[in-house]
Image (tube, rainbow, N blue to C red):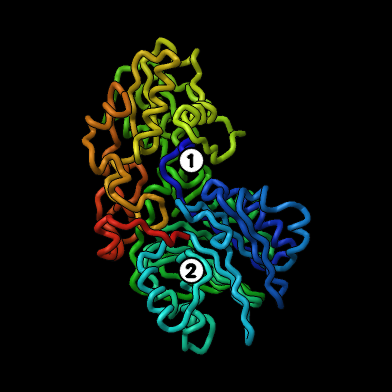
Amino acid sequence: MLAEIKGLNEECGVFGIWGHQDSALVTYYGLHALQHRGQEGAGIVVTDGNDLNSHKGLGLVTEVFRTEELEHIKGKAAIGHVRYATSGGGEEKNVQPFLFRSYSDYDVALAHNGNLVNAKQLKEELEIEGSIFQSSSDTEVLAHLLRRSKAESFIEKVKMSLNKLEGAYAYLIMRDNMLVAASDPNGLRPLSLGKLGEAYVIASETCALDVVGADWIRDIDPGELVILSDEGVRFERFSETCNRAMCAMEYVYFSRPDSVIDGINVHAARKQIGKKLAVEFPVAADVIIGVPDSSISAAIGYAEQSNIPYEIGLIKNRYVARTFIQPTQELREQGVKMKLSPVRSIVEGKRVVMVDDSIVRGTTSKRIVNLLRGAGATEVHVRIGAPPITHPCFYGIDTSTREELIAATHSKEAIKELIGADSLEFVTENGLIDSIGRTCIYGENSLCTACFNGKYPTEVYEEINEGNNRLTAKC
């Protein structure tokens, strides 16, 4: 899978709607807008007020759902999910939403974006108590906690169960008579509430609200439940110990540029990052280019600040299969060329500044630098819109060991030599924070910058923190 252009992958996107006669179709469009958050699997569960029914499978949203599939899942409410699988996790049993059938009372469906850092401990405890897990996903833990809860009402069961979870999560939980959304006490993953006519909509990003024509109401707060039903919407808290720590990489890379997170437009934040890069690390050059797609905004910002022309110097082929697996190095390199092509007339004979959002393993940056040199660039200066990623993320991004991260084991000069650049600079951590316009102290409206500095907003368990084990229970 070496032809994947980016080195980071976010795990999931969720979408839910209550009170719409075409809930499955609206969810389909919502998931399509969130496709960038996961391309390995997709699913939708609907309820007509009595029964829950689902359809899901491996592949893109348009591959999993055809007209006939959408016709077979009708209801007034739905939740949906798109998933990116980590290595070894791309199995159909892990595709969400999960639907859990009950013999004696109600069925429950779950969809989850994030990662639970205490999933291993909870699974061991639950198995001792008799639970049998049907997937390798940490999402399933919540279903077992709900079933074993002694609380009287369903909402109290949800609250009690969520308080046993640690890590990052944006959950959608649906029964026949309600849809519940929950954001973890640190708000590490985005989750927004909107309204479409008389229906209420919840989505990982505001771009999905825009696509289905819903009006944004507000973001869901850390430690908060949003409960949708035929009676309307209500808000309750399940945790009072809340410290906002939104993932900085949502602004840098993961979210769509037209999304708004906590009142900050992602495109505008990326432009500011590019401008900050130009101030912090100027360079004499003839042209600025961005690596498509997430780095375009930062490249435009760098160009505006430096008064060096921005040009489209790399073209992304959007019609290449998303995995393009080939057995030999030569064919793998050909896969990269199929996905990205330099524009020779733009870069030939030019000193080029290549703006990218991050360097994870370094292999992709090296290939792109080589592509530009092969197209005749006389110099290639690399500017990165994130600080060096030196620590693994345990909250739903596929970097789980330090060994995977080139900046954890190599100096900036060594990385520059490895990727073949004439110069290499990363935006500073303070520069990133200033550009986004939020604080990094773990308090109100703060950022999680743990992948840059190792300061995790939640407890990180010893066996994970040592970096010896890859998490295997991603959402």
Where residue 91 appears, as percent x and y from the top left, is 55, 57
Residue 146 lies left or right of residue 418; in this view the side is right
Residue found at x 42% / y 49% = 250
- For this rendering, which residue is in front, 333 or 369? 333
Residue that sits furthest to the front in the current view: 327
Residue found at x 62% / y 77% = 101
Residue bearing mark 2: 182
| Mark closer to the chain start, 2 or 1 | 1
Residue found at x 61% / y 53% = 58
The count of marks equals: 2
Where residue 426 appears, as percent x and y from the top left, is 29, 35
- For this rendering, which residue is in front, 421 or 174? 421
Where disc 1 sits, the SS reads loop
Where disc 2 sits, the SS reads strand
Q: Considering only vertical position in the picture, is 49 above or below 402?
A: below
Q: Residues within 10 Å of mark 1 (few under 14, many from 20)?
A: few
Q: Considering only vertical position in the picture, is 65 above or below 73?
A: above
Where residue 134 appears, as percent x and y from the top left, is 53, 70
Residue found at x 39% / y 13% = 350
Residue bearing mark 1: 1
**Does residue 340 appear in the picture of this structure?**
no
- For this rendering, which residue is in front, 172 or 72? 72
